[in-house]
Image (tube, grey):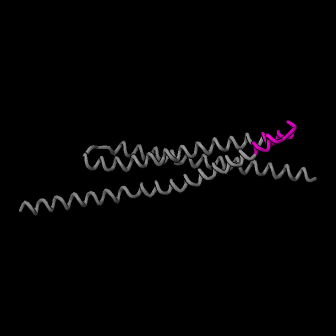
Amino acid sequence: MSDALATAAYSVHAAEIAHLIQVALTPIFLISAIGVTLNVLTSRLARIVDRARSMEEQARGCPARAEAAPLHAQLRILERRARVMNAAITLITLSALFIALVVVMLFVNSFLRWDLSAFIASMFILSMLSLATALLAFLIEVRIATTTLRIGIEEVSRQGE
């Protein structure tokens, strides 16, 4: 009889763990999506840095200060874009860290029987706010890039006249 009770207790516990793993999978998929987005953001930052280094070399090669002025203006724009992109990367990384805390705390909550529901909800909310802010920073960086592209097209067309 005691073996049957032990088996029943084990089955319930195993079922709880299986359910907990199912619950934890959703945030883990979110971490995966954040990782893909982080890859896009870091690639974009790398392109900005590469372009800035190339323009710095061009500016150093300009004999006259007046010739280097447009390059310095573009470098200031690239610096701003890099700062915004760095902020987006920081925020999206924080979002992934908060989600990781959510997963850990789900298990701690279950095994230690502590009531961490407010903490878990807070971490999830912080993660979503951080993710939304990171995406907003990404949008701002894209707007800066497209706005400066339009200005560059207008300057080239004026020079052609």
Residue at position x 37%, y 50% from top? 103
Q: Position of residue 38 (x, y in %)?
A: 55, 52
Q: Which is the main secondary structure of the residues drawn in magenta?
A: helix
Q: Position of residue 147 (x, y in %)?
A: 74, 49
In terms of depth relative to the viewer, which is nearer, 159 or 67? Answer: 67
> In the image, is 128 to the left or to the right of 107?
right
Q: Is residue 56 magenta?
A: yes
In the rendered image, the quadrant that contains the N terminus is: bottom left
Task: Report the magenta residues as a range.
Answer: 55-72
Residue at position x 50%, y 57% from top? 33
In the rendered image, the residue lying farthest to the top is 65
In terms of depth relative to the viewer, which is nearer, 156 or 133? Answer: 156
> In the image, is 150 to the left or to the right of 94?
right
Residue at position x 89%, y 50% from top? 158
Q: Position of residue 64 (x, y in %)?
A: 87, 37
> In the image, is 114 to the left or to the right of 161?
left
Q: Which quadrant of the structure image shows residue 98?
A: top left
In the rendered image, the residue lying farthest to the right is 161
Q: Which quadrant of the structure image shows residue 2?
A: bottom left
Residue at position x 61%, y 53% from top? 43
> In the image, is 48 to the left or to the right of 12?
right
Q: Is residue 92 magenta?
A: no
